[in-house]
């Protein structure tokens, strides 16, 4: 999962890309990059670095990153977290094209091998699946800049036909045109907006476009490619149609609450998840004195639930805002240490109470277990752990770094067994129907819940093996 930005038609394109990325920092904290094209000097400039966006760029960066068009990327690593070669954007100087990618290509190793076999000149500078996308496009173009928009559309269509997985991509050409495209299932989000006749931007989430003052916001549709030229002409082409299956986890956890995803605002989806869970609490006859959110993501759902149950909503777990989201941290020891430092209970308010503790989702269960322990130690009489997401029991092949299934707390456990494992008196999960109703989409990717994926995932095991190897390597490096 990563964040993407593309800006065309303003002299401040690099700074705008930076501000856009700052609004997408939650989508990846492992590194960031911005690439610009300067029409006057007809050249690309790029800066990339590891860590948070504000640590990668300085005022000096924007003096070097010149030109009216820019693309930017903030990285969430599923593999090779410490490898600087995996930072994006990726540039092919011969074809005069650079791209940044959010998602995961399931058949990446297979396509990569085929490219190397068929095209002796193809060279990869990294193990990144995003480079595979770039090289598919560039080999189709004969490693030369596209002659016109039709040729670029054809190259993207060719890449789409070869790729299996999730991809939202923003790209830039040496002539300063931006382009963007999205996988035919629409698993990862991508939007674009307009500020005036020649000034447009792309972003992974609407919140970044809103912040920068772009309006007339529209989705890059699943299977669609969009090209925007430096003089503000917009060309759209639908290239491939498959079942539309956006990732349910965007609404549940990943996206900013201010964003609009598809036809449902993230805020509304989270509110409705809470209302639906309140009905379930009533149906089961669970009694409670107070509703507590586990900050931050579950706040909206917990508030809705409290309102519907006519119970007080109380912030009784106080977060140390300087500790990163534990889910993104990539090794077990780092996550456990972060949880310990992250939350503090208000014991005087918890003492003797029956608590409904609301979390957005339960993945490994490490956070939930630690929190249940904290609340019990603070004197709670009874703890019901409520998850706004149904049980996650299967891998994600599309860019969310869930651990292997045997590390997922819901894998092959009943609700009672999960409650016992987490130390809670009971757990209440959102139902699949409740999730679908709250998110309001015609169809969704729910692969990690149901094991039914919107694409072929037969090559996914190769990716999982590589990821496990990578994890062991990283672990041995830290020991
Ligand atoms: S498998 Fe789960 S996390 Fe991955 S894209 Fe599908 S819904 Fe999202």
Image: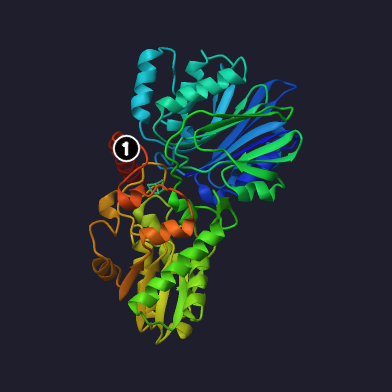
Please give the count of numbered marks on the rendered protein: 1
The part of the image, by quadrant, that contains residue 335 is bottom left
Q: Report the coloring of the rendering.
A: rainbow
User: Helix, strand, or loop for circle 1?
Assistant: loop
Q: For the point 35% across and 15% down, which residue is it?
A: 117
In the rendered view, would you say 52 is above or below 315? above
Q: Residue furthest front?
A: 442
Q: Is residue 287 visible?
A: yes
Residue 191 horizontal side relative to residue 313, left or right = right
Q: Quadrant of residue 121?
A: top left
Instruction: Kindly give the residue lying farthest to the bottom in the view shown.
Output: 352
Residue 314 appears in the picture as rendered: no
Pick whichever, 333 or 284, lies toward us.
284
- Of residues 229 and 375, the one nearer the viewer is 229
**Image position of 281 (left or right of 195):** left
Instruction: Using the image as rendered, state which of residue 217 and residue 97 is in the foreground.
Output: 217
In percent of width and height, residue 406 lies at 25, 52
Residue 186 image offset from top left, x and y in percent: 48, 40
Quarter of the figure with residue 458:
top left
Q: Nearer the viewer, residue 161 or 410?
A: 161
Q: Which residue is mark 1?
A: 457
Q: Residue at x 46, y 49 (%)?
A: 442
Q: Is residue 170 left or right of residue 70?
A: left
Coordinates of residue 318 in the picture (x, y in percent): 51, 72
State left or right for residue 278 relative to residue 410.
right
As drawn, 16 above or below 327: above
Crowd band around label 1 with a 10 angstrom C-alpha radius: few (<14), some (14–19), many (20+) = some
Residue 358 in picture, x, y percent from top left = 43, 69
């Amino acid at each position: 999962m990563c964040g993407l930005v593309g800006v065309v038609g303003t002299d401040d394109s690099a700074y705008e890309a930076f501000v856009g990325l700052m609004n997408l920092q939650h989508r990846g904290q492992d590194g960031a990059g911005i690439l610009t094209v300067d029409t006057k000097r007809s050249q690309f400039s790029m800066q990339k670095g590891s860590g948070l966006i504000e640590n990668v760029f300085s005022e000096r960066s924007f003096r070097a990153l010149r030109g009216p068009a820019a693309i930017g990327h903030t990285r969430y690593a599923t593999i090779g977290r410490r490898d600087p070669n995996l930072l994006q954007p990726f540039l092919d100087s011969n074809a005069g094209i650079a791209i940044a990618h959010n998602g995961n290509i399931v058949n990446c190793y297979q396509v990569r091998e085929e490219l190397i076999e068929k095209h002796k000149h193809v060279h990869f500078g990294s193990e990144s699946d995003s480079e595979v996308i770039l090289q598919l496009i560039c080999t189709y173009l004969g490693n030369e800049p596209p002659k016109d928009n039709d040729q670029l559309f054809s190259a993207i269509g060719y890449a789409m036909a070869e790729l299996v997985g999730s991809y939202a991509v923003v790209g830039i050409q040496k002539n300063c045109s931006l382009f963007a495209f999205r996988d035919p299932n629409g698993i990862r989000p991508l939007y674009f907006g307009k500020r005036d006749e020649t000034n447009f931007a792309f972003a992974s989430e609407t919140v970044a476009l809103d912040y920068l003052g772009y309006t007339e916001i529209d989705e890059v549709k699943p299977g669609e490619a969009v090209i925007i030229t430096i003089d503000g002409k917009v060309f759209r082409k639908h290239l491939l149609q498959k079942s539309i299956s956006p990732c349910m986890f965007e609404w549940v956890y990943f996206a900013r609450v201010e964003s609009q995803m598809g036809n449902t605002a993230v805020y509304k989806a989270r509110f409705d998840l809470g209302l639906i869970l309140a009905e379930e609490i009533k149906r089961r006859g669970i009694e409670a004195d107070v509703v507590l959110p586990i900050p931050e993501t579950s706040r909206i759902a917990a508030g809705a639930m409290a309102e519907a149950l006519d119970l007080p909503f109380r912030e009784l777990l106080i977060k140390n805002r300087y500790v990163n989201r534990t889910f993104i941290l990539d090794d077990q020891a780092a996550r456990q240490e972060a949880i310990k430092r992250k939350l503090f209970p208000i014991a005087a308010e918890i003492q003797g109470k029956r608590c409904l503790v609301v979390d957005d989702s339960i993945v490994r269960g490490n956070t939930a277990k630690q929190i249940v322990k904290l609340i019990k130690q603070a004197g709670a009489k009874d703890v019901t752990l409520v998850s706004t997401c149904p049980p996650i029991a299967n891998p994600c092949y599309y860019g969310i770094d869930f651990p292997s299934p045997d590390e997922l707390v819901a894998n092959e456990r009943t609700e009672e067994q999960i409650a016992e494992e987490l130390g809670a008196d009971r757990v209440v999960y959102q139902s699949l129907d409740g999730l679908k109703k709250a998110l309001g989409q015609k169809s969704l990717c729910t692969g990690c819940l149901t094991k039914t994926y919107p694409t072929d995932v037969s090559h996914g095991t190769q990716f999982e093996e590589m990821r496990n190897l990578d994890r062991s390597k990283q672990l041995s490096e830290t020991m």
